[in-house]
Amino acid sequence: MSDAQWALMEPLVKKSGRGTGKTTDLPLRDSVEAILFKARENAEWTQAAATMGHGVGKSLMSRWRRWSEGGVWEQLMEALADAEAVPAPEPSGFQLPDLRIEGTVDPRLLIEDLSVDAHTVASSTTIN
């Protein structure tokens, strides 16, 4: 993410712990980048945390869950709605036709839970 995009997002995120007054050591910008990496690459939380060079997947997932449940993730996506799009990486093994994807990251797709069916979520999501 660019510095300009981060400038829109930084005021929206808050460094918070687990309600004990303890703050987490995961840098905010790195956390947002890792969560976006997870969404783009369909990666595990541990893989996303590894992109930051510190922390573990559980800590990153907890941060995302707090942001999602508190409405922060939705605010972040709204803040980036008019930002310049970043091209999606080419998947290995096959080529996609030329297309333009716009929208937000549906938080339900970041949950690693068998009770969430990605196909159901995708079919209920509209892309403009």
Image (tube, rainbow, N blue to C red):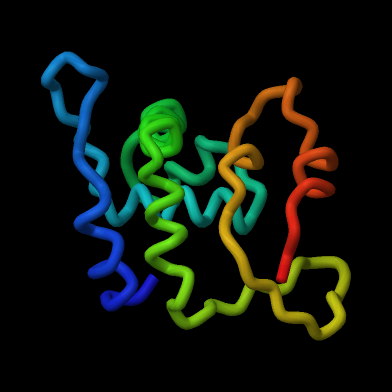
Tell me what residue is drawn at x 51 percent, y 36 percent: 46
Query: In the rendered image, which quarter is residue 107 located in?
Result: top right
Position of 90 compared to 56: left or right? right
Please tell me which residue is depicted at 40% across the width and 40% down the height of the picture: 71
Percent from the top left, x then y, of residue 69? 43, 31
Rendering coords of residue 63 (x, y %): 36, 34
- Please report the residue visible at 84 percent of the width from the left and 75 percent of the height from the top: 96
Above or below 36: residue 6: below
Q: Which residue is at a point 37% across and 34% down the rendered structure image?
A: 70
Residue 13 location (% of width, % of height): 26, 48
State the image quarter where residue 89 is shown. Answer: bottom right
In the image, residue 60 sits, relative to residue 96, either above or below, namely above
At which x and y percent is residue 12?
Answer: 26, 52
Specify whether 99 is left or right of 70: right
Quarter of the picture holding the C terminus:
bottom right
The N terminus sits in image quarter: bottom left
Is residue 67 found left or right of 7 in the rendered image?
A: right
Residue 22 shown left or right of residue 42 in the figure:
left
Camera-side residue: 92 or 37? 37
Q: Is residue 22 above or below residue 7?
A: above
Answer above or below: position of 127 versus 84: above
